[in-house]
């Protein structure tokens, strides 16, 4: 089954979750790159060195400069990472060929654009940013940004899906099968480049116009952005929603060091490596900074409310669960363990949470809090991209000033509603809670998960994002939520044959355990 399948056998949910999880492969490299750039850029900044003279040591500054450059190169080449990552993430088999073909196609597309710009006399000789052009892997081309990478990734996946098993005439047999994919992808990329030259300048104007529309909605638009983002979270479709704002001109444009940079996150990391930047881009406050208020403070108040409203005999078990979930949210910004503890038993609480989150984004916008992030809004990113960058650039000191009242806002509202409507949140169930058993790697966890998914033969596709297994099955009726919950799942979402099983940050280990079983059975 393909995301391009039109037979009706594939639901929108299955297609969307596969597309969404394909973004996670390139996103996964961002925290490490952000760590290098955050520490290196902050501690090699001339203003920081002037403030803290003990950092002014030649060999130490050299290390920080290397770290900064090593991190910034990743963000400067996000387009190619997305091109390769999406092709690899979507391909079911022969992923290496899909990745190589996508890289080749990306190079060919930009080389074709360069040649056509030169032929038509529109290749800029100065002020590349003003002409909507830039450099990509050493080639002057149109600034298509991450969008260009996504187009190439999807195109390559489609061609790989269609031709990776093609049989050519015997005298061309060597070029058949997977070897044909890079060839056909390269030729297709020439046509994509030609289309880009004609279409992209108009598309740029359209995107800039949409960005202006978002800006014109002001604080209300920011609130709506945060609300919609949180409401999409349970379905695992939030990546599709926020990434255009983070990585394309929809999230704004800025000229940094003479280069046109598009997308909130790309602008932030470009400015992070620029020692002349005095104040970070305001779009960061609209599309990023509100997360810190919710993830580091608000949801902790929700945890305390659920603990205090639990039955006395269940508080010991509930306390352990919520403490672990709260620390995860505070440190890393991963909120699913908390959210899925009340999403299904009290959906009204989740809608209220989404509204509060939207308000947090709006307040961050109003106060011009400009703390960037790699993929989430936890304490680690708060220190790297807030505290270390200084108050003048980020207004980070305002986050705890807003966060503490936000903690109590969540606490009192959640506690009141839980008691008022007798929501069966953690520890309020009619039956007494059993102590949670954490299954070790040597235990039967992966076998239990396979049983819950209808066994090995029922699984068509298995992958994961930051917190959840994303599975496509042959027969959705064979999926057992009860068994999956026994395996330690926080929640289970199913639409047709698309299944998401939420486990939290340890999901990558769980995926590896299941794949080990697949390998053993195939031997």
Image: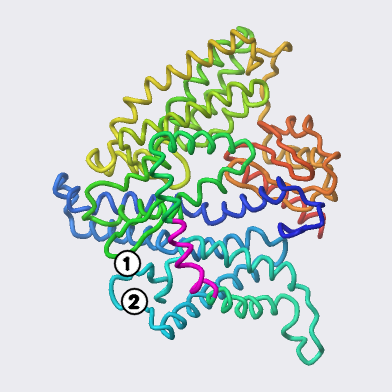
Label 1 crowd (10 A; few <14 / some 14-19 / many >=20): few
Q: What's the residue at 30%, 30% (across, down)?
A: 398
Numbered-mark total: 2
When the figure is inspected, residue 522 is found, relative to residue 391, above or below; the finding is below
Which image quarter: residue 94?
bottom right
**Magenta residues, as a range?**
195-207
Per the image, label 2 sits on a secondary structure element best described as loop
Q: Name the residue under label 1.
A: 130
Residue 190 magenta:
no
Q: Is residue 346 left or right of residue 295?
A: right
Q: Position of residue 196 (x, y in %)?
A: 51, 71
In the picture of the structure, the residue carrying the numbered disc 2 is 124
Q: How crowded is mark 2: few (under 14 residues within 10 Å), some or many (20 or more)?
A: some
Between 248 and 92, the one lying in front of the other is 248
Which residue corresponds to the image point at 60% horizontal and 11% vertical from the top-left? 310
Q: Residue at x 75, y 81 (%)?
A: 176
Q: Which quadrant: the N terminus?
A: bottom right
Which residue occupies the foreground of this view, 39 or 218?
A: 218
Viewed as shown, does residue 388 lie left or right of 476?
A: left
- Which residue is the extreme one toward the bottom? 171
């Amino acid at each position: 089954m393909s995301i391009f399948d039109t037979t009706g056998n594939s639901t929108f949910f299955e297609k969307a979750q596969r597309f969404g999880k394909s973004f996670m492969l390139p996103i996964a490299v961002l925290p490490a790159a952000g760590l290098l750039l955050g520490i290196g850029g902050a501690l090699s900044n001339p203003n920081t060195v002037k403030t803290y003279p003990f950092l002014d040591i030649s060999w130490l500054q050299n290390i920080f400069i290397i770290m900064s450059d090593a991190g910034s190169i990743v963000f400067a080449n996000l387009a190619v990472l997305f091109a390769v990552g999406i092709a690899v993430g979507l391909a079911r088999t022969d992923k290496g060929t899909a990745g190589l073909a996508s890289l080749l196609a990306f190079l060919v597309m930009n080389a074709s654009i360069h040649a056509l710009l030169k032929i038509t006399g529109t290749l800029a000789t100065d002020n590349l940013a003003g002409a909507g052009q830039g450099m990509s892997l050493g080639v002057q081309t149109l600034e298509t940004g991450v969008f260009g990478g996504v187009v190439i990734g999807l195109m390559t996946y489609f061609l790989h899906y269609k031709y990776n098993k093609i049989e050519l005439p015997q005298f061309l047999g060597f070029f058949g099968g997977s070897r044909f994919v890079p060839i056909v992808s390269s030729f297709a990329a020439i046509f994509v480049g030609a289309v880009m030259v004609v279409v992209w300048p108009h598309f740029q104007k359209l995107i800039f116009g949409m960005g202006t529309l978002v800006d014109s909605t002001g604080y209300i638009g920011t609130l709506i952005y945060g609300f919609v983002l949180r409401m999409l979270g349970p379905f695992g479709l939030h990546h599709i929603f926020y990434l255009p704002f983070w990585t394309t001109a929809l999230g704004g444009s800025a000229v940094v060091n003479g280069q046109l940079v598009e997308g909130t996150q790309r602008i932030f990391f470009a400015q992070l490596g620029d020692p002349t930047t005095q104040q970070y881009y305001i779009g960061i406050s609209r599309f990023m900074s509100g997360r810190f208020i919710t993830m580091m403070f608000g949801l902790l108040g929700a945890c305390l409310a659920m603990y205090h409203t639990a039955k006395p005999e269940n508080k010991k078990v509930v306390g352990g669960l919520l403490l672990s979930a709260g620390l995860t949210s505070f440190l890393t910004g991963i909120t699913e363990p908390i959210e899925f503890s009340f999403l299904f038993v009290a959906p009204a609480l989740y809608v209220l949470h989404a509204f509060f989150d939207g308000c947090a984004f709006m307040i961050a916008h109003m106060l011009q809090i400009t703390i960037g992030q790699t993929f989430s809004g936890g304490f680690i990113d708060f220190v790297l991209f807030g505290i270390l960058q200084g108050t003048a650039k980020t207004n980070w000191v305002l986050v705890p000033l807003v966060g503490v009242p936000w903690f109590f806002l969540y606490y009192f509202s959640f506690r009141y509603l839980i008691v008022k409507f007798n929501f069966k949140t953690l520890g309020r169930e009619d039956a007494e809670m059993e102590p949670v058993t954490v299954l070790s790697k040597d235990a039967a966890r992966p076998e239990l998960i396979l049983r819950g998914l209808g066994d090995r033969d029922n699984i068509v596709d298995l992958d994961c994002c930051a917190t959840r297994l994303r599975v496509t099955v042959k027969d959705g009726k064979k999926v057992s939520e009860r068994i999956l919950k026994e395996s330690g799942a926080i929640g289970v979402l199913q639409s047709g044959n698309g299944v998401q099983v939420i486990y939290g940050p340890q999901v990558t280990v769980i995926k590896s355990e299941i794949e080990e079983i697949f390998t053993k059975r195939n031997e």
